[in-house]
Image (spheres, rainbow, N blue to C red):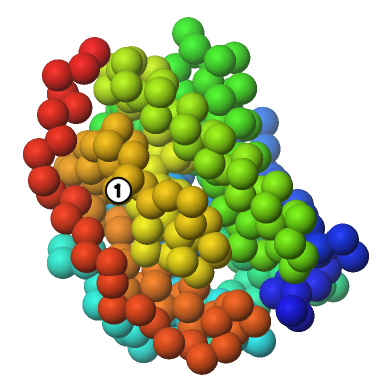
Amino acid sequence: MKAQFPNEQTESGEFHRQEDAFREWVSDDGSSPYPAATDRYHLYVSLACPWASRTIVFRKLKGLEEAISMTVVDPIRDEKGWAFREASGKIPPGAPFESTDPINGFHFLSEAYKGTEPHYAERVTVPVLWDKKTKRIVNNCEDDICRMFNDVFNEFAQNKNVDLFPKDIEAEHAKLASFLHDNVNNGVYRAGFATRQRPYEIACRRLFEALDGLEERLSKSRHLFRNRVVEADWRLFCTLIRFDSVYHGHFKCNLRRIVDYPILQGYLMDLYQQPGIADTVNFDHIKRHYYMTHTEINPTRIVPIGPVLDLWKPNNREQLT
């Protein structure tokens, strides 16, 4: 099979994700060229991408919608990369997302990359935090963007008391986040983009070993760190919400579905039912992106009509502490 991302695949068939290229920081203490401000920064995202979706969730939870504007790219990525087009598919009710670019009039997100680094030649990714004043990308790392939304933009946040990186569990939280990234968030991609049997099986088995362990952990507490919701919960959520729709079938992560894990399924529904979160999830964009973009995996580009997911059922997670 031809590799989806040839520069990120080894001869042995493994997928190795490229490093994020832009890692500058917005600061609230004058320590960087990018001061925290309202209506200065713009977020470019895809509703299909789990990495970008975590920044959308943080923007929502912190109440930064008025401080940081946002544009959604079209879900279909082709040889020209992420594109801005007229509204494509169903947009969640109450979510005023753009499909064209009202900030720079870009037709492709690659224009933002080239405008920042003319010699940039790697894969163009989302999310992107753009500075309207200097007309440059500040950062394209979702981990950094989430941290900035939580900390340095707090002056402009409507929900200042929301802290998704609590200091008292910092070390344990960072360790779990790293585990989730390696085995779950990126694990589905390491399985899905493997081009040989052995790397696929190794990645897939590691993924389900991690899910089995998380099922056990979450049987004892409502969230990953008892009754508080932290960044690691949303990191896990962004993979779980896509799992049964795309990763189970499209990426061949099919030992089990999330619905086959009673604890994980209840945990997923609990997070989905938090105020405003459902508006950040768009299954139409998710399915059309994966099934229509990865033609090496799905050459017919047929998008399945299922599965039917009822994420609004009672889950009784509130009974746990």
**Quadrant (top left/top right/bottom left/bottom right) for the N terminus:** bottom right
Residue at 18 percent across and 43 percent down: it is 273
Answer with left or right where residue 231 lies relative to residue 62.
right
The single residue placed furthest to the left in the displayed view is 314
248 w.r.t. 217: above or below: below
Q: Position of residue 126 (x, y in %)?
A: 56, 62
Residue sitting nearer the eye, 64 or 216: 216
Q: Nearer the viewer, residue 42 or 84?
A: 84
Q: Element at badge 1? A: helix
In percent of width and height, residue 205 lies at 61, 44
| Residue behind mark 1 | 259
Q: Give the residue drawn at x 65%, y 76%.
A: 110
Residue 97 image offset from top left, x and y in percent: 31, 69
Q: Can residue 42 be seen in this snapshot?
A: no
Could you tell me which quadrant the C terminus lies in? top left
State the residue lying farthest toward the bottom: 300
Relative depth, front residue between 42 and 15: 15
The relative height of residue 80 versus residue 154 in the rendered view (above or below) is below
What amino acid does circle 1 point to?
A: Val
Q: Residue furthest right?
A: 11
In the displayed structure image, the side of residue 303 where residue 263 appears, left or right: left
Q: In the figure, 36 relative to 172: above or below?
A: below
Position in image of residue 31 (x %, y %): 67, 31
Q: Residue at x 39, y 72 (%)?
A: 287
Residue 242, visible in the rendered structure: yes
